[in-house]
Image (cartoon, rainbow, N blue to C red):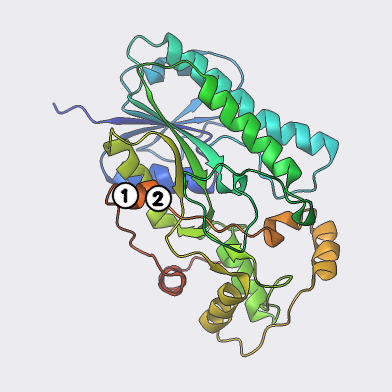
Amino acid sequence: MMIRPKLILAGGSGFLGTELAHHFNVLGWDVVVLTRQPSQARASIRDVAWDGETTGDWTRELAGALAVVNLAGRSVDCRYTPANRRIIIDSRVKPTCILGEAIARCERPPRVWLNASSATLYRHTLGAAWDESGTDFTPTPAVHDEFSLEVIHAWENAFNTATTPRTRKIALRTTLVLGHARNSVFPVLCRLARFGLGGRMGSGNQFVSWLHQADFCRALEWLIGHDNICGPVNLATPNPLPNRDMMRLFRELVGAPIGLPATEWMLEIGAFFLRTETELILKSRRVVPGKLLASGFEFQFPAMRDALHDLARKRRPV
């Protein structure tokens, strides 16, 4: 009997984890999801209990696995109160640390460990795009990104200091992933555009780096299969675009003739009532996938117009 390759998905019950589990399951992989709330709803995907902080029976699943993908982390779409700040950092650092310990002790450790990170690490810029060679991680007070950088530095430090000499490591510096999850950006911006609120946000000049959910899954499959790629990898298309152009494409998609702009003070008020932060909108993230392109990866959806129309054709109720 042919042995199927095994993928361990830590924190794999959210939007991206669900997409990855489905993608690799279709490919015939043995997919194991480490989750705080195991469910038997998916017959072909195994849920295994873990708390993201301590070792336990879940560590047995690591032996002989081809890859581990760690996506654990509380959403940053909230107000950055002291309590939420602590939760956001701990929910990323603690699972990363315990995975590192478990992999280090494993007799047959996974061949590759891909750990979530964020392309928000790169400095706010309206100029040249950042690839993985960029090392300017200076915060920009005007867009309130100081805490985000603190989180990412702690996250990547926990990953980089884990001693796993037999396991290749990749930090997934992910940008905005467009998909169908109920509270993800695609359905939210579609709703805003339909209601006439799909104008530029702030100046509209800030760049948005992004990725179709299908290319996110395909990129991880590619990274797992290419042993020469390690270290930080930007998960983004080669074509970031200004916020004003992105919103125009959403208006075009839903057939909205106009879209009222949202000034920065309007965004501040809206963010307060929605319990989120304006940094998620105002920071200019101009990031490109240097390592993916250099390795020969081809994007299925390199242009946002094509990505939006594909998602619209496969739209789920929102």
| Residue that protrudes farthest toward the bottom in the picture | 257
At 48% from the left and 42% from the top, the residue drawn is: 17
Given residues 24 and 115, the one toward you in this image is 115
At 73% from the left and 48% from the top, the residue drawn is: 145
Q: Is residue 107 above or below residue 154?
A: above
Instruction: Answer yes or no: is residue 50 visible.
Output: no
Q: Considering the image in quadrants, where does the N terminus appear?
A: top left
| Residue that protrudes farthest toward the left in the picture | 1
x and y percentages locating residue 73 in the rendered image: 61, 36
Residue that mark 1 sits on: 294
Secondary structure beneath label 1: helix
Instruction: Answer yes or no: is residue 216 visible.
Output: yes
x and y percentages locating residue 57 in the rendered image: 48, 14
Residue that mark 2 sits on: 290
At 58% from the left and 81% from the top, the residue drawn is: 251
Q: Which mark is residue 69?
A: none
x and y percentages locating residue 208 in the rendered image: 57, 63
Q: As drawn, is 172 to the left or to the right of 245?
A: left
The amino acid beneath tag 1 is: Ala
Kindly check if marks 1 and 2 are in contact, taking CB atoms under 8 A apart as contact. yes
Q: Is residue 314 above or below residue 33?
A: below
Secondary structure beneath label 2: helix
**Circle 2 residues within 10 Å: few <14, some 14–19, many ≥20:** some
The amino acid beneath tag 2 is: Gly
Q: Considering the image in quadrants, where does the C terminus appear?
A: bottom right
Q: Is residue 19 above or below residue 270?
A: above
x and y percentages locating residue 239 in the rendered image: 45, 65
